[in-house]
Amino acid sequence: MSTGTIVLVGTVLFAAGCSTGGTGLRDGGPARTDPVVRSTPPTAEAATEPAAPGHSPAAGTASPVKKVDPVALLKADPKVSSAVKRDLKPCTGNEYPVDVSYGKVTGNTEVDIVVNVLSCADALGRGSYVYRSAAGKYENVFSDERPPVYAEIDRGDLVVNKPVYAKSDALAYPSGEDVITYRWDGEKFTELDRVHTEYSNVVDGGGQPAPAITKN
């Protein structure tokens, strides 16, 4: 199964917290591939900062994961737009529409943090950010606020999924998708690869024929 196909499949990690109507969470949003697991909690010594409700740090990293409060991180970041900050509110209770991944993506000795901000109604990605630890602080080294967008770590690279919608497209059926792979060059992320997928507009029982994939 290609990354482009995966993007239309099960993406319900945050569904319980944000479902407020519409067609359901992640109908047209991206799915995670296979890079970073998030189930093992950090050691007591490492968990020194408050964590967002409902999110756990990654396992399999070289050192204990230090959890952060992603909402506080975003609100304190001058590189995050005022529009994203203004709409960064709980969908229900204390559940924010934020996904967090911990892993190595910048070649740093410390774990990097990938944060995705979603919309409550349909869970489409509103902004994706990468934070790198430097001198005890987290520096924003990547941001994409052109929705819909969703970023994740895949085997040490940063992969950004961007569904493409035509005016007549239903949320569950975008016309296509761009999957862009970035690699850290020591100072910044540079584009390594880009795959554009155009989906068929023929729908049969909720399924679609295999998409035609073009590689730029």
Image (spheres, rainbow, N blue to C red):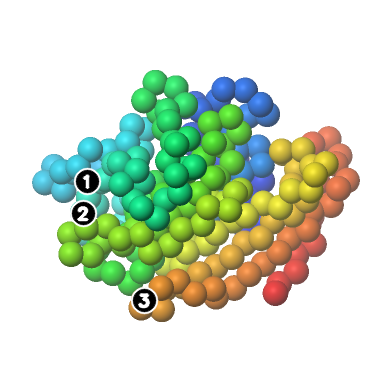
Left or right: residue 182 versus residue 122 is left
Residue 74 percent coordinates (x, y): 36, 46
Instruction: Please give the residue where the numbered disc 2 appears in the rendered image.
Output: 64
**Mark 2 vs 3, N-terminal side:** 2
- What's the distance in space between the residues labelled 2 and 3, CA to CA? 25 Å
Which quarter of the rendered picture does the C terminus lie within? Answer: bottom right
Residue 16 percent coordinates (x, y): 49, 26
Amino acid type indicated by mark 2: Pro
Q: Quadrant of residue 136?
A: bottom left
Q: Nearer the viewer, residue 176 or 44?
A: 176
**Mark 1 vs 3, N-terminal side:** 1
Residue 149 percent coordinates (x, y): 57, 51
Looking at the image, is 117 positioned above or below residue 25?
A: below
Amino acid type indicated by mark 3: Glu
Q: Nearer the viewer, residue 33 or 113?
A: 113
User: Decide: marks 1, 3 in contact (CB < 8 A)?
Assistant: no
Left or right: residue 184 versus residue 122 is left
Instruction: Please give the residue where the numbered disc 1 appears in the rendered image.
Output: 42
Residue drawn at (42%, 28%) of the image: 90
Q: Quadrant of residue 111?
A: bottom left
Q: Nearer the viewer, residue 204 or 120?
A: 120
Label of residue 187 in the image? 3
Residue 5 percent coordinates (x, y): 68, 53
Categorize mark 2 by other alpha carbons within 10 Å: few (<14), some (14-19), many (20+). many
Amino acid type indicated by mark 1: Pro
Looking at the image, is 184 positioned above or below residue 91?
A: below
- What's the distance in space between the residues labelled 1 and 2, CA to CA? 6 Å
Residue drawn at (45%, 49%) of the image: 81
Secondary structure of the residue carrying tag 3 is loop
